[in-house]
Amino acid sequence: GAVVSQHPSRVICKSGTSVKIECRSLDFQATTMFWYRQFPKQSLMLMATSNEGSKATYEQGVEKDKFLINHASLTLSTLTVTSAHPEDSSFYICSARAERGWTYEQYFGPGTRLTVT
Amino acid sequence: AQRVTQPEKLLSVFKGAPVELKCNYSYSGSPELFWYVQYSRQRLQLLLRHISRESIKGFTADLNKGETSFHLKKPFAQEEDSAMYYCALSGPSNAGGTSYGKLTFGQGTILTVHP
């Protein structure tokens, strides 16, 4: 089956620093990956769509200068939280879209727990 | 705007009882509907999608366009079904474009099946 990994699984950083989260599709190529944010006991909120070789598409209300997305290859997308603040503490989940004939399927990573102190 | 509503945050049933997790949606067009499941300490995974018309782990879901619903049902719940269930919606897969397929999730329902 298709596997998506995320690194790191959890990270603690100080306020004002930047942190990078990697999302990799391990056994398939993904031209499109998605980044979600999940608050405790709440649903997943789509932050942005990451497209290989082009700029990411951000959802309304998501600061593109704060959440930098780079999709440099068909198997890797990165999310960098710049100048992190405690309110950025959250669970960040990526997914990668795999084409399945005439349709597609999304595979999710295990998530990254970010804590900003 | 597209929206997915799961009215029940928590649902408890006993083993062997029928279970129904409700999902209603709003979307202007023909969406694709999904159910995702997240077991304890595991990642989100696809349970079923309406276009497949499959029964996975005994679960079924029928898309009712008139009622804009996609309720998840299982006639006899098992303890291992205890998990968080998310209903999700996306635009049709044949819509094309680089951002098609992005999912809108409901709030999730925590299902607990008691022995």
Image (tube, coloured by chain):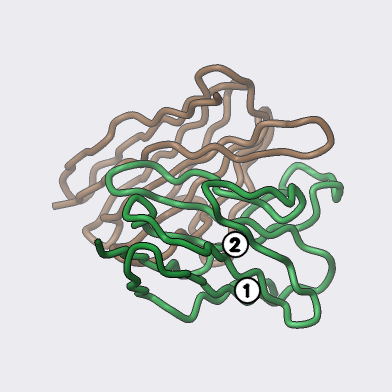
Q: Between marks 1 and 2, how big is the CA–CA gap?
A: 7 Å
Residue name at image x 28 percent, y 63 percent: A40
- Neighbour tally class for label 1: few under 14, some 14-19, many 20 plus, Cα within 10 Å: some
Say left or right for A35 vs B41. Answer: right
Which residue is more in the foreground, A80 or B80?
B80
Which residue is more in the foreground, A117 or B5?
B5
Of the two numbered discs 1 and 2 on the same chain, state the one appearing first in sequence.
1
The colour chain A appears in is brown
Name above or below for residue A36 compared with residue B22. above
Residue name at image x 21 percent, y 59 percent: A86
Residue B15 pos. (x, y %): 34, 63
In what element is the residue under mark 1? strand
Q: For mark 2, what is the residue?
A: B104
Q: Quadrant of the N terminus of chain B?
A: bottom right
Hey, which quadrant is residue A96 in on the image?
top right
Which residue is more in the foreground, A56 or A29?
A29
Q: Which mark is residue A48?
A: none
Residue A91 pos. (x, y %): 32, 51
The colour chain B appears in is green
The number of numbered badges drawn on the structure is 2
Residue name at image x 27 percent, y 62 percent: A87
Tags 1 and 2 touching, CB below 8 Å = yes
- Neighbour tally class for label 2: few under 14, some 14-19, many 20 plus, Cα within 10 Å: many
Q: Amino acid at mark 1?
A: Arg
Residue B7 pos. (x, y %): 48, 81
Residue name at image x 52 percent, y 64 percent: B75
Q: For mark 1, what is the residue?
A: B3
In what element is the residue under mark 2? strand
Residue B95 pos. (x, y %): 85, 50
